[in-house]
Image: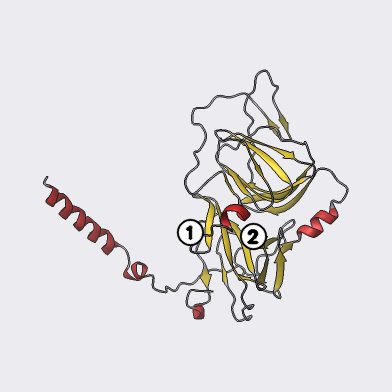
């Protein structure tokens, strides 16, 4: 086939594909649908709650060297705040089919991730390990480290076999030595080992003011930064999600939140805010300076359902 005919065929194919996409979708027009909301509204089931204050968590565990504070438990994610004393380290482990990711709230953690040079993550860092990628962590320096750790719910870690080590133990599980073929999931230009928030993101912010740090078919960790604005009126309901929950960690400044059935409240650095599925919610940058929230949910292309009168925007 000649080059001209090939180009002509490609042009016809493009026209056919474009014709197959509804005109409204091609143009980014506002669409309307009946979106289901739970009746009664979805409640927060412990440990989930509207806001976990990092200062209160730290006060509750004062005097403890090592501790784990459950923060999120739902159908998609298990998330904990974890403190690890200086010199403490984790056993090398990995997850079969899911990535794990972290926000470092304080202290310093040396991450050793297979295929990467070890690095030290401090306050504001975000780190991720793809599936089947062994990793370990060690608190370095003289202060404890505090991290917000997010994994998929209902999963159990695997441990690489090392020499003549014995099988680990876990409640309700029996570990068995196995073999497998497919190795680690590779990092990409979008899913990188870490983001130094204060060093990379703040000094070289993206043009749009936000950028995904974790993005795959089942995970989304989106860094959203902007300058403080007046708190919107209560008539601005924000949006809701139909079949999944969403939560945020505040990485900089302060964020104003409005949840359906609640008054506006302000979250500070390290606080975790949680919106149950089907409940109207909105977030806005508070104060006069820059603020950042890191949104976490299982749907990178998740549908935002806005009020019909809002024009598909918040």
Question: Disc number at residue 274?
Answer: none
Residue 115 pos. (x, y %): 54, 33
Q: Nearer the viewer, residue 228 or 275?
A: 228
Quadrant for residue 276, please give it.
bottom right
Kindly identify which residue carries mark 2.
248
Residue 120 pos. (x, y %): 66, 42
Residue 180, relative to residue 27: is it above or below? above
Number of numbered tags placed on the structure image: 2
Quadrant for residue 176, please give it.
top right
Residue furthest to the top in view is 164
Instruction: Report the Cα–Cα distance between label 1 and label 2.
Output: 17 Å
34 on left or right of 88 = left
Kindly identify which residue carries mark 1.
301
Judge depth for marks 1 and 2 and give the one in front. Answer: 2
Residue 155, relative to residue 218: is it above or below? above
217 on left or right of 229 = left
57 on left or right of 158 = right
Mark sitting earlier along the chain (1/2): 2
Q: Residue at x 59, y 76 (%)?
A: 237
82 on left or right of 314 = right
Q: Residue at x 71, y 28 (%)?
A: 168
Residue 231 pos. (x, y %): 64, 77
Q: Nearer the viewer, residue 237 or 163?
A: 163
Q: Residue at x 71, y 44 (%)?
A: 108
Q: Quadrant of the C terminus?
A: bottom right
């Amino acid at each position: 086939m000649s080059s001209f005919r090939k180009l002509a065929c490609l042009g016809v194919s493009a026209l056919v594909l474009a014709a197959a996409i509804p005109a409204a979708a091609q143009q980014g027009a506002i669409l309307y649908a009946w979106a289901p909301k739970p009746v009664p509204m979805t409640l927060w089931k412990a440990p989930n709650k509207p806001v976990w204050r990092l200062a209160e968590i730290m006060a509750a565990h004062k005097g403890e060297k090592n501790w784990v504070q459950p923060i999120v438990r739902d159908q998609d994610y298990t998330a904990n705040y974890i403190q690890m004393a200086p010199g403490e380290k984790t056993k090398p482990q990995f997850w079969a089919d899911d990535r794990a990711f972290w926000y470092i709230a304080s202290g310093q953690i040396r991450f050793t991730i297979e295929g990467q040079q070890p690095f030290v993550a401090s306050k504001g860092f975000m780190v991720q390990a793809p599936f089947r990628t062994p990793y370990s962590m060690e608190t370095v320096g003289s202060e404890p480290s505090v991290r917000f750790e997010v994994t998929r719910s209902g999963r159990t870690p695997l441990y690489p076999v090392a020499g003549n080590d014995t099988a680990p133990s876990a409640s309700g599980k029996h570990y068995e030595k196995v073999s497998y073929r497919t190795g680690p999931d590779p990092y990409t230009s979008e899913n990188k080992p870490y983001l130094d928030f204060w060093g990379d993101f703040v000094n070289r912010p993206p043009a749009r003011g936000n950028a995904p740090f974790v993005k795959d078919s089942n995970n989304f960790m989106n860094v959203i930064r902007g300058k403080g604005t007046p708190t919107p009126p209560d008539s601005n309901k924000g949006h809701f999600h139909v079949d999944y929950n969403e939560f945020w960690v505040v990485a900089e400044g302060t964020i104003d939140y409005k949840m359906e059935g609640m008054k506006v409240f302000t979250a500070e650095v390290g606080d975790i805010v949680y919106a149950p599925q089907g409940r109207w919610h909105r977030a806005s940058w508070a104060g006069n300076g820059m603020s950042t929230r890191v949104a976490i949910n299982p749907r990178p292309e998740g549908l935002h359902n806005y009020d019909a009168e809002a024009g598909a925007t918040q």
